[in-house]
Image (tube, helix red, strand yellow):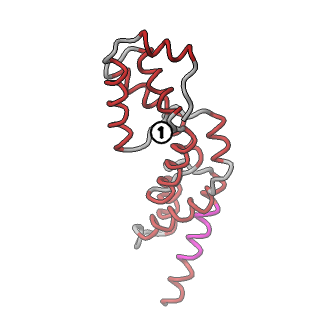
Amino acid sequence: MELPNSDEHQRFQSMDKNALPDAFAYAMRVLALRSHSSEELLRKLLKKKHAIPVAEATIERLKMLKLLDDESFARELISSRSRKRPQGTIKMRAELTAKGVSETIIADLLSQYDSATLCYQAGLKKLATLKGADNAAAKSKLERFLYNRGFEWHAIEQTVKRLLSLSTSSEDEMD
């Protein structure tokens, strides 16, 4: 484990002796529940009335101990959303930005994001709830649903076209 440089060490020493351990203990409790970005955790520390230098020192200490990593947090969030509730790159980017993840990390991770496949999976699941709706209504509801999930228009168009052609062909086979 790396030791803090002398400037950081002096900063730790000049703070209230209980402030840093209290902030660190709070941060550990928060991180035990789920991962957070640095910015998100900083906001929570400040909301709990920890002084800015104490909150920043706590964040730095957690980073040094490798207990706080924005890239790992973002990867985990993307993976979780992809499994449970697929959303497009537009919404994913907005959520990561709101959580304080840097644009560099977001751009890197979303360049590997398979939005078209996730759009199809989400659309397929939604289509199952639209049984009995005519094609025009189903198309409109699918488009709106996928748009609200943050998928790009070209992926929505391809997905809706593909799903409605599957739906129509399966109905024809039943007749």
Q: Is residue 166 magenta?
A: yes
Q: Which residue does the numbered mark 1 point to in the structure image? A: 67
Q: Where is residue 62 drawn, in percent x and y?
A: 47, 32
Q: Is residue 167 above or below residue 66?
A: below
State yes or no: residue 17 in magenta: no
- Up-down: is 94 above or below 60? below
User: Is residue 81 toward the left or the right of residue 102 in the image?
Assistant: left
Q: Residue at x 52, y 52 (%)?
A: 87
The spot of residue 105 in percent (x, y) is: 63, 39
Q: Residue at x 42, y 30 (%)?
A: 41
| Amino acid marked by disc 1 | Leu
Q: Residue 114 location, x and y as percent?
A: 63, 57
In the image, residue 140 above or below residue 39: below
Instruction: Kindly state the secondary structure of the residue where label 1 is placed.
Output: loop
Residue lying furthest top: 14
The secondary structure that most of the magenta stretch takes on is: helix
Judge by depth and name the residue closer to the eye, 40 or 20.
Answer: 20
The total number of labels drawn is: 1
Residue at x-position 43% and y-position 42%: 35
Other residues around mark 1 within 10 Å, as few (<14) / some (14–19) / many (≥20):
few
Which sits in the foreground, 28 or 5? 5
Pick the quarter of the image with the N terminus: top right
Could you tell whether 108 is left or right of 135 in the image?
right
What range of the chain is rendered magenta?
158-167
| Residue drawn 61% across the image and 66% down it | 161
Q: Position of residue 136 (x, y in %)?
A: 51, 64
